[in-house]
Amino acid sequence: MLDVTRRNVPLAIAGLWAATRAAAAQGRIVLHRGNDGDPETLDPHKTSTVAEAHLLRDLREGLVIHDMKGEVVPGVAESWTMSPDGRLWRFTLRADAKWSNGDPVKASDFVYSFRRIVNPETGARYASLLYPIRNAEAIHKAAGGSAIEDLGVAAPDERTLEITLERPTPYLLELLTHQSALPVHPASVARASQAPGRPENWVTNGAFMLKEFAPNSHIRLDRNPHFHDSANVKIDTVIFYPASDLAAAARRFQAGELHLTTDIPADQFKQLRQKLGNQVRIGPYLATYFLILNSAKPPFDDARVRRALSLQIDREFIADRVWGGTMLPAYGVIPPHIGNYGERAELDFRHNSVFEREEEAKRLLASAGFGPGSPLSVEFRFNTTDNNRHTAEAIAEQWRAIGVETRFVETDFRTHFAYLREGGDFDVARYGWIGDYSDPQNFLFLFQSDNAGFNIGKYSNPHFDALMKLAADELDIARRAAILREADSIVTTETPWIPVLHYSTKNLVSPKLVGFESNLRGAIPTRFLSLKA
């Protein structure tokens, strides 16, 4: 976790704007971006949130990256080949790739980085994402005496990286765009871990480098002069502001203090669209908004209780009235537009009337022992944004109709996700999952019993686990999709997490900002943006 000293926020912001004016006077181009919140860490192997992903896309570059269209394009690797059996990938690194201190980026740096993330001592939540690599799972689980050197990643020379897989993986290139596959600078890892609050300790290889981090205020990144494409990076400085107060962020945008936001207050959407026109950008997103139920504790270990709570949520009302039509009702775990799949599993009551759903929910709670004399009490945790608060209030009001009493625990972005990550006790918790790659496995792996990093509700179903293992070993894409569809049906029916909404990307984009495009990944690398004078 990034351990930094908190500063006086008003003074920090005042000083920042003075510095920004001075930079403008010197002809430097400064981009002001809203972000979902403060990062818990800038270590790519310990990261887990979208807010961190936005920063890491600017700070580091992997073998491949997402461009502004959300398409996979070369990063540090200038080219790659795949063996006929799909198990060996060979990447050729560009000769001019450098770290922010001027060191060359070498294939051995990637070997070190892949070994580091699967090393169980690192404590990486996303290590399981790399299980397609030979021996990654065994090493991460410390099984069978596997040594870290057995990982299927090798550097025959300093510009060639070979990745050997357990099995053909159709989404490998998409996977390698993820922050878990980003490289770290071997010689500076220890220094950054010991004193993460010092920007000079973070040696990175992306288009930008860390200049300043003031928690609850801003993070400043400056253009990296050693970046291989630095001549085409038009932004000199990008400043990220934690913007969980979406109404305040919208006001700052309209005042010209922000050029870009990553979310919009849903209750102001129509007003903002009418006032700002095409500065309001809405697009499809590979993501689902969930309520996680703690399946390891009564009464949420009872499938009847979980189904009752899901039945009573009026998703159409929440999507239309709470989110202003900027989200889609979700009746399944997996969002639309997913790749390598067919028809998605959905809840069987989707087309039932609100009355029919409510009557079934009441019957289920009664059969589970809850009623007028003994109401179900639920603690509902969520991270603070206007949209999340309004959603929680709407759901609590809907649950009230079936005798559920709800109390809220509302914390900031960083605290909420740290609490869940560290295994804090809860009943119901708001969660969102953004697809790391376009494949159903990336949503279904959340429910595997051995996924300690992300199976936050501690759901366990041996048949589901067996299906996921079977799918991982299946080479035929159509048969694999059918197996995953069966697994999808299990978690949809048993409802360990309640799908509420499918996201859309929602941005306020200044007319001065050039190059922005909405995309399924929500990827907005600053290196592809520029500002009009």
Image (spheres, rainbow, N blue to C red):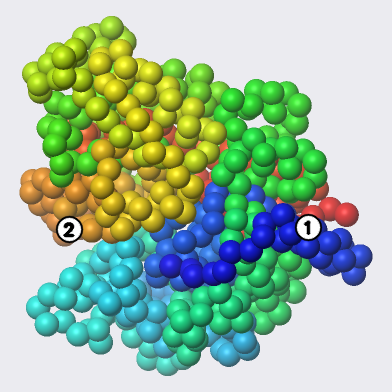
* Residue 434 position (above or below residue 111): above
Image position of 155 (left or right of 484): right
| Residue mark closest to the camera, 1 vs 2 | 1
Crowding at dot 2, Cα within 10 Å, few <14 / some 14-19 / many 20+, comes out as some
Residue that appears at 67% across and 65% down: 220
Which label is found at residue 450? 2
- Element under disc 1: helix
Residue 327 visible to the viewer: no
Which quadrant would the C terminus be assigned to in this image?
bottom right
Which label is found at residue 63? none
* Residue 130 position (above or below residue 504): below
Image position of 521 (left or right of 532): left
Depth order, front residue of 373/250: 373
* Residue 323 position (above or below residue 525): above
Depth order, front residue of 92/176: 176
Q: Which residue is mark 1?
A: 14
Residue 231 visible to the viewer: yes
Give the x, y percent position of residue 407: 35, 30
